[in-house]
Image (spheres, rainbow, N blue to C red):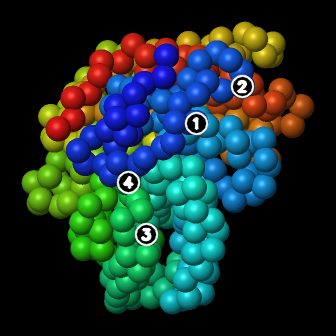
Amino acid sequence: MPISRRTFLRSAAASALLPVVERPPTHLLPGPDGDGPPLAERAARKGLFYGCCAATAYLDDAGFAQALGREAGVLVPEWEGKRGRIERRPGVYDYSAADRLAGFARRHLMALRGHALVWHLSNPGWLDEALSVPGASDRLITDYIARVVGHYRGQIQSWDVVNEAVEVEDGRPDGLRASPWLKAFGPGYIDTAFHAARRADADAVLVYNDYGLSAADPWSASRRRAVLALLTGLRRRDTPCHALGIQGHLRAFGPRFDPDVFRRFLAEVAALRYRIIITELDVRDDGGPTAPAARDRAVADLTRRYLDVALDQPATLGVVTWGLSDRYTWLATPAEHRPGTPPPRPLPLDDALRRKPMWHAIAAAFDTARPRTHG
Ligand code: 9MR
């Protein structure tokens, strides 16, 4: 049953923190699969949001673009919002690709997430060089953020301001990654970035985003500890970071997922007064049975158990999957996929854009989530 237009508009905002995005009634119709409303609507009914990442190349695929416009209420540039794409030459900003994604989002009345301002990967070569010069200026952070966040001011629901700053293996007591940023400026670069983002857009939800926070193994436990320490410090210093982005790259046949461990972590994050966004959900399905149906079941089962915990935490605002269809996933790239093994099926729609068990798992998790009562 389609929800009322008013409910949709209110809940598309996901919280008082997020801007309302208006979508026309056509978006409330069931998809061609005939098995009910899209994920964006199911999330919005509960005051949550659902979205996914995409790249401009996928928009040229008409079938995919249609599925994207229907299922997702939030769009995230998969890589074309990164510095290596936007500032290829120092001080020369090229927003053409990210703007095309923003235009798609606008036309389909989707909200936009920004990803990612300060990361150790996908940077232009000149930047790594500039950061390695002794006495480098922190304007290498603040100028970029002022320009890019300023360019999208008013269009972005939430920004991944700092991405993946934790790497316990680097051996620092604080668990921070010995990234070019940290080497140039010390741990304060994280605060510098959030303050710059806040100055450039006072309304966007500012997010610290990281991976390896969900499973029960010791490696994930050490990452959780480091992230909690980081969030505690940011809060103590009154740094304007509003939410933790939990990437959620899961493994169906990997380290055990323990709902209680994850639940406790979310509660600790919420107790520090952070909101939570699941920002890059997908499920690796290698290392188990090869039959697609068995893999799909395992992926869906883990997705459901994971999201039931995530959505049970009142601080959680929404869920973004890292892609929509198995047709386009980073897990199929040569760096991630072993030749001769079955193509990965980590996302809600299969490569023919049909809804998979994972889609139904996400739908059911939204359907059973407690409604949010944002002001
Ligand atoms: O999926 C993204 C892929 O297309 C890019 O080539 C890659 C490098 O920019 O980044 C991938 O997305 C990553 C995200 O930005 C941060 N978390 C891990 C994601 C998967 O590597």
Q: Earlier in the sequence, mark 2 or mark 1?
A: 1
Q: Using the rendered view, name the quadrant where residue 63 is placed.
A: top right
Q: From the image, state whether disc 4 or disc 1 is nearer to you.
A: 1
Residue 152 is tagged as 3
Expressed as whole percent of the image width and height from the top left, the position of residue 136 reads 38, 87
Residue 32 is tagged as 2
Query: Decide: marks 2, 3 in contact (CB < 8 A)?
Result: no
Q: From the image, state whether disc 1 or disc 3 is nearer to you.
A: 1
Query: Secondary structure under badge 3?
Result: loop
Residue at label 4? Answer: 157
Query: How many other residues sit within 10 Å of disc 3, few (<14), some (14-19) or many (≥20)?
Result: some
The amino acid beneath tag 3 is Tyr
Residue at label 1? Answer: 26
Distance in Å between CA atoms under marks 2 and 3: 33 Å
Task: Answer left or right for 191 relative to 122.
Answer: left
The amino acid beneath tag 2 is Pro
